[in-house]
Image (cartoon, rainbow, N blue to C red):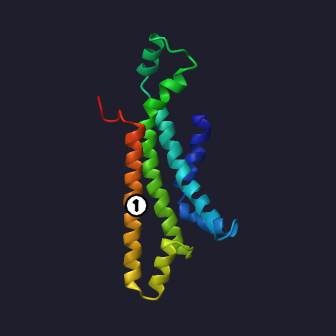
Amino acid sequence: MRALLNPLITFVRTLPPLAYFSLLIIWPGIDEPPKVSLLLVAALPPVAVATADAVHGVHEDYPHAARSLGTGRWQLPYRIVPPSALPEVITGIRVTVGVAYTTVVAAETVNGVPGIGGMIRDAQRYNQTDVVVLGLLVIGASGLLIHALLQLTERLLVPWRGKA
């Protein structure tokens, strides 16, 4: 699977997500579907790479130790791999959410789609510095909130991370 999917994922991952945005506006229209599609296009390749690397990076001693302690062959993928890979998968998700968020805001700014980015673009056209600064503050504050929520999620899902 890795040899089959890796070139495709790498190809899609190296294309800038904003390059898709014009096409996404042409096909589903200006409303919410292109934003959701853009989020998927921006987010899936980095998450796929992080997940594949996390699963591939599970230390080979873990399955051996589990087998010697009586874990069945069919239980290994459920009991050993997820707890070992989950910290790296969550890190990939945290990075990806940041990329996806900035991509959507940038797309709104470039194409004037309604949203914070569109508001900034319109304010820039009319030299409304206060609205531009407010938009930047809202983007930064919402980014901090998203980051804090992801860190909380990580602490809840992976309490063992960083311990021994």
The residue at 62%/65% (across/down) is 32
Q: Is residue 13 or residue 153 the one in the foreground?
A: 153
The amino acid marked with disc number 1 is Gly
| Left or right relative to 72: residue 65 | left
Inspect this view and state whether residue 138 appears: yes
**Quarter of the figure with the N terminus:** top right
Q: Is residue 152 or residue 105 the one in the foreground?
A: 152
**Quarter of the figure with the C terminus:** top left
Residue 41: percent from left, percent from top:
58, 55
| Left or right relative to 150: residue 34 | right
Counting labels gives: 1
The residue at 57%/35% (across/down) is 2
Residue 45's place in the image compared with 164, above or below, is: below
Residue 28: percent from left, percent from top:
69, 65
Which residue in the rendered view is the most extreme toward the right? 27
| Left or right relative to 118: residue 149 | left
The residue at 49%/67% (across/down) is 105
Residue 117: percent from left, percent from top:
49, 72
Which residue in the rendered view is the most extreme toward the bottom? 126
Q: Identify the residue under disc 1.
A: 143
Residue 98's place in the image compared with 115, above or below, is: above
The residue at 40%/43% (across/down) is 154
Inspect this view and state whether residue 57 appears: no
Residue 7's place in the image compared with 146, above or below, is: above
Q: Is residue 77 or residue 131 the one in the foreground?
A: 131
For the residue labelled by badge 1, is the local secondary structure a helix, a strand or a loop? helix
Residue 87: percent from left, percent from top:
41, 37
Residue 159's place in the image compared with 12, above or below, is: above
